[in-house]
Image: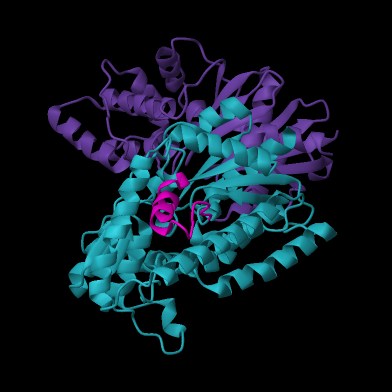
């Protein structure tokens, strides 16, 4: 079996996807990126191969994407994450669409036309607001596990509004919330609301909205906020954290 | 010059501090005495250099700090220059004169030109009092004539960027513009551009581009990121992308200079510049540039400390793309303060934009 490999070296996590010649997903895996991006990329690929009993020599071509794309020595081709998220979303949904990718350190809004051609994109400003890094900071000050945030938000009975653009200011707001006696679950719900507000401020988010990225993958609660804010349903591909890696694998296949 | 002054432009020192990547170490000294990290980083770099007594100019033989006899400013670029000169005024206790030009103009009318040119004219008497010499009107006219000739020459240089492939790109031009900026009214600047033009015309004749195998042409709107000129130049060249034109380098084209009407024509020239115009006027200007230079996309630099030169903040990119179909990106950065710049994010933005243009 011939395989095509996509490696998405994100700021927080490294994702690997293997597809076959028909474009079917064969295996995938994720590891924390850490400081040694080149090593983690290779180890993540090898772990995915081992877990699925696939052989490295079956990989005909590899495409790397994400901030560490140029560090992946075994990739024959690289593409930016903007291109790969677009390609990954088009695998699941037809254009036109507006893709919202919420990653560990940044978020992106990508617009595709009816032919799937990219007509524009925006990245967040150099600021953690609206990203996974913001949620990590909030989890730390609330002394809750990042993996617990989604469940806690689901238990909220009220939403505490966090008004600041700035992550540091938001944390001091939370200290005030504590003194006022606000519940942790309600503050977590407020943190998710804050992420969505920062993204809606970036662009009108017209048409069919597709959500991708690790933050959405680990926190389905956020999907409901988008639907409420936009007053319509939004789409989420299967395993949204792997959309960029899937797109990279598809690019590898198409450029072979 | 026509008054007999030797002129120093601190903006150029600011750019020099940025290009030599010293600015980010100097700016904090100005921040510490109350100049916000949000105000012009030319100002804070230059003030920081003064406070720390550090400058690349120290390498020049015989360099000494040019203690001023008088400080002169024009707010046509921004009001920060006034505060900048005011810093040195307080330090040296010398007179400060200025021209406060109107801004946000759609049409430049006689009223606006009057406002600027009368302020320029009103400076003659106090300047003469400082030098002890009356204005040499003939030399004044000659200086304006030479400035006009230089401006025309610089314009001709930049217009070669319309050739495909372009023989000169934005990063070349940010260096070659030096004489047009500091030597207006000096024949040596004209000679410099005669030499450069000959080389550019030769490149066009031979089909030699500034970037090998150019396949994408961009327009740069906004300030350069001075400390990253080489990185950006090499990165884009690797992507076979030329930045064929820019508003920034065009800013030293002054079509209005007229030696027969020197005061008024200076007033007009310094009022009708891009930065002092309305959003509608700027959009029309960019439309002309897109067509003239056969541009595939526009890169807007949102400079943290230079709102006046960041033309992405009032919806202009969106309106221009809507009208022309020419895509754009915005990169966040700064002219000098590299604390406001993310290398990775900027390069990903640029690369993704070029990928997008290649798909179209």
Image coordinates for residue A37, horizontal then vertical, percent: 59, 52
- Residue B259 part of the magenta-drawn span: yes
Q: How many labels sit on residues?
A: 0
What residue lies at 33% left-to-right and 61% top-to-bottom? B43
Image coordinates for residue A110, horizontal then vertical, percent: 58, 29
Image coordinates for residue A248, horizontal then vertical, percent: 70, 37
Closer-to-camera residue (B327/B239): B327
Extreme residue in the bottom direction: B62
Q: Colour of chain A?
A: purple
User: What is the span of residues highlighted in magenta in the rendered image?
Assistant: B253-274
What residue lies at 57% left-to-right and 71% top-to-bottom? B189
What residue lies at 43% left-to-right and 35% top-to-bottom? B106
- Residue B184 part of the magenta-drawn span: no
Closer-to-camera residue (B353/B15): B15
B242 vs B200: above or below: above
Extreme residue in the left direction: A180
- The quadrant holding residue B32 is bottom left
B31 vs B300: above or below: below
B131 vs A75: above or below: below
Q: B321 left or right of A75? A: left
Q: B241 left or right of B137? A: right
Image coordinates for residue A160, horizontal then vertical, percent: 25, 24
B13 vs A246: above or below: below
What residue lies at 50% left-to-right and 11% top-to-bottom? A233
Q: Colour of chain B?
A: cyan
- Res. B274 in view: yes
Which quadrant of the figure contains the N terminus of chain A? top right
Which quadrant of the figure contains the C terminus of chain A? top right
Extreme residue in the top direction: A232
- Res. A47 in view: no
């Amino acid at each position: 079996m011939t395989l095509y490999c996509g490696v998405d070296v994100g700021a927080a996590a490294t994702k690997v996807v293997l597809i076959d010649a028909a474009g079917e997903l064969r295996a995938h895996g994720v590891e924390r990126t850490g400081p040694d991006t080149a090593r983690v990329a290779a180890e993540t690929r090898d772990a995915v191969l081992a877990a699925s009993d696939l052989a490295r020599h079956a990989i005909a071509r590899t495409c790397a994407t994400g901030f560490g794309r140029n560090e992946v020595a075994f990739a024959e081709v690289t593409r930016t994450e903007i291109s790969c998220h677009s390609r990954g979303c088009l695998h699941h949904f037809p254009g036109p669409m507006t893709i919202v990718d919420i990653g560990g350190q940044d978020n992106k809004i990508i617009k595709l036309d009816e032919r799937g051609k990219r007509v524009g994109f925006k990245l967040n400003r150099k600021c953690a607001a609206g990203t996974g890094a913001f949620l990590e900071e909030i989890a730390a000050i609330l002394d809750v596990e990042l993996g617990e945030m989604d469940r806690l938000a689901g238990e909220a009975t009220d939403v505490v509004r966090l008004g600041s653009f700035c992550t540091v200011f938001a944390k001091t707001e939370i200290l005030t919330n504590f003194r006022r006696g606000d519940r942790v679950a309600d503050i977590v719900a407020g943190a998710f609301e804050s992420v969505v507000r920062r993204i809606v401020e970036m662009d009108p988010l017209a048409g069919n909205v597709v959500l991708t990225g690790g933050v959405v993958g680990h926190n389905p609660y956020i999907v409901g906020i988008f639907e409420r804010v936009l007053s319509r349903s939004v789409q989420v591909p299967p395993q949204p954290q792997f959309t960029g890696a899937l797109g990279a694998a598809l690019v590898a296949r198409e450029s072979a | 010059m026509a008054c007999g002054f030797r002129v120093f432009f601190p903006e150029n020192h600011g750019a020099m501090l940025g290009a030599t990547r010293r600015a980010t170490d100097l700016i904090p000294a100005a921040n510490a005495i109350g100049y916000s990290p949000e105000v012009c980083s030319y100002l804070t770099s230059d003030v920081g250099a003064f406070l720390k007594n550090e400058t690349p100019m120290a390498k020049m033989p015989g360099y000494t700090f040019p203690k001023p006899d008088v400080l002169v400013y024009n707010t046509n670029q921004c009001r920060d220059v006034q505060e900048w000169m005011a810093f040195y005024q307080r330090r040296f206790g010398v007179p400060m004169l200025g021209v406060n030009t109107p801004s946000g103009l759609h049409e430049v009318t006689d009223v606006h030109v009057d406002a600027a040119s009368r302020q320029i004219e009103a400076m003659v008497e106090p300047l003469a009092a400082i030098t002890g010499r009356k204005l040499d009107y003939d030399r004044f006219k000659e200086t304006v004539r030479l400035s006009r000739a230089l401006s025309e020459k610089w314009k001709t240089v930049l217009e070669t960027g319309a050739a495909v492939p372009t023989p000169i790109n934005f990063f070349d031009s940010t260096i070659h513009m030096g004489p047009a900026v500091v030597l207006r009214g000096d024949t040596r600047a004209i000679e410099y551009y005669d030499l450069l033009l000959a080389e550019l015309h030769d490149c066009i004749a031979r089909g030699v581009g500034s970037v090998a195998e150019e396949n994408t042409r961009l327009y740069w709107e906004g300030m350069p990121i001075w400390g990253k000129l080489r990185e950006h130049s090499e990165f884009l060249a690797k992507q076979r992308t030329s930045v064929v034109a820019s508003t920034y380098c065009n800013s030293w084209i002054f079509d209005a200079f007229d030696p027969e009407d020197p005061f008024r024509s200076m007033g007009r020239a310094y009022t009708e510049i891009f930065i002092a115009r309305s959003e509608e006027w700027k959009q029309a200007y960019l439309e002309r540039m897109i067509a003239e230079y056969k541009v595939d996309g526009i890169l807007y630099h949102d400079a943290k400390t230079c709102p006046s030169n960041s033309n992405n903040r009032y919806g202009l990119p969106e309106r221009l793309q809507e009208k022309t179909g020419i895509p754009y990106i915005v990169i966040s950065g700064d002219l000098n303060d590299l604390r406001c710049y993310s290398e990775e994010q900027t390069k990903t933005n640029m690369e993704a934009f070029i990928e997008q243009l290649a798909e179209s």
